[in-house]
Image (tube, rainbow, N blue to C red):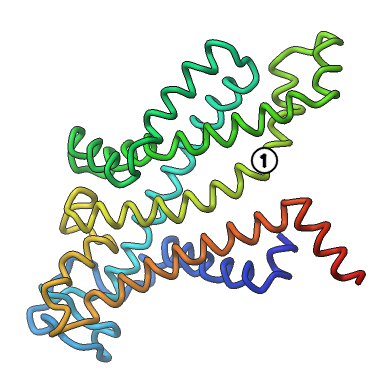
Amino acid sequence: MLALVRDRVGLLGLTLVGLAFFAAIIGPFIAPHDPTEIFGDQRLAPPSSTFLLGGDELGRDILSRALHGARISIFVGVTVVALAGAIGVTLGVIAGYYRGPLDSLVMRVMDTLFAFPTLLLALVVVAVLGTAIVNLIAALTIVYVPAFARIARGSTLSVTSEPYVEAARSLGVSDFRIIRRYVLPNITAPITVQFTVSLAYAILVEASLSYLGLGVQPPDASWGLMLSTGKPFIELSPWLSIVPGLSIMFTVLGFNLVGDALRDAMDPRLRSREQLSQRV
């Protein structure tokens, strides 16, 4: 965490991520209006003292809907990445540790899923399961499991080839204890970086699916859905699309910046180069 604060890029990313989580957690409680409440006289209204960010095509407060949309986007993103990370890391560690036929079976399934474009695979799963938040989470979880599995497997193969793991095996230490004590702590760094990057893309894919009508459904507020409904009025009332568009952009940018800073902080090669340059 200290390394992120010292890094200007990481600090900017943390600030953007912090604002996104603040909007998701506190936003609905400080929203000036109900996100579904309709004010007939505020239809397509420009920003004013009544609606600070203007009104949408039905006369609903854009600020209130953006704050509630942050909760949905962050909730879906965190839930998806947590589930995908748990499943993917488990499969990857098992495949990398035991190898053999089990490794081949698991990774061929992961490779098959990984071969499909992310958005296309999510579209297929949502189309089959139906449009609901639970189905959306399930679809995105399936999409992001292979990335975690591949990283966990590669890191596990590297760790299990170390002499201290071979020594633990020769002493009769159980597989579970070796994985818990030696493998998992040593693969935390790449998994953490993948977590932040996947979280950014999960929010982006959720917004894309909602934009296409396969994600969050009206009257619930979602950044992607707000972009979709504001598209016909982009020339007349651009704030309908600008607000959710900027929300998505800054949130995704924040997570990507945090991921880059974490990668730089956790990579020993980059740290050694930085220390060498400081000495010079």
- Above or below, 109 against 62 in this view is above
Give the labeled residue for mark 1: 188
68 to the left or right of 194 = left
For image coordinates 59% across by 33% down, the residue present is 152
Q: Position of residue 28 (x, y in %)?
A: 36, 65
Q: Position of residue 117 (x, y in %)?
A: 33, 43
Q: Position of residue 240 (x, y in %)?
A: 22, 76
Q: Quadrant of residue 164?
A: top right
Query: Which residue is at the far right?
Result: 279
280 to the left or right of 131 = right
**Quadrant the C terminus occupies:** bottom right
For image coordinates 47% across by 49% down, the residue present is 198
- Above or below, 158 against 134 in this view is above
- Above or below, 88 against 7 in this view is above
Q: Quadrant of residue 153?
A: top right
Query: Which residue is at the far left?
Result: 40
For image coordinates 34% across by 55% down, the residue present is 72
For image coordinates 61% across by 46% down, the residue present is 192
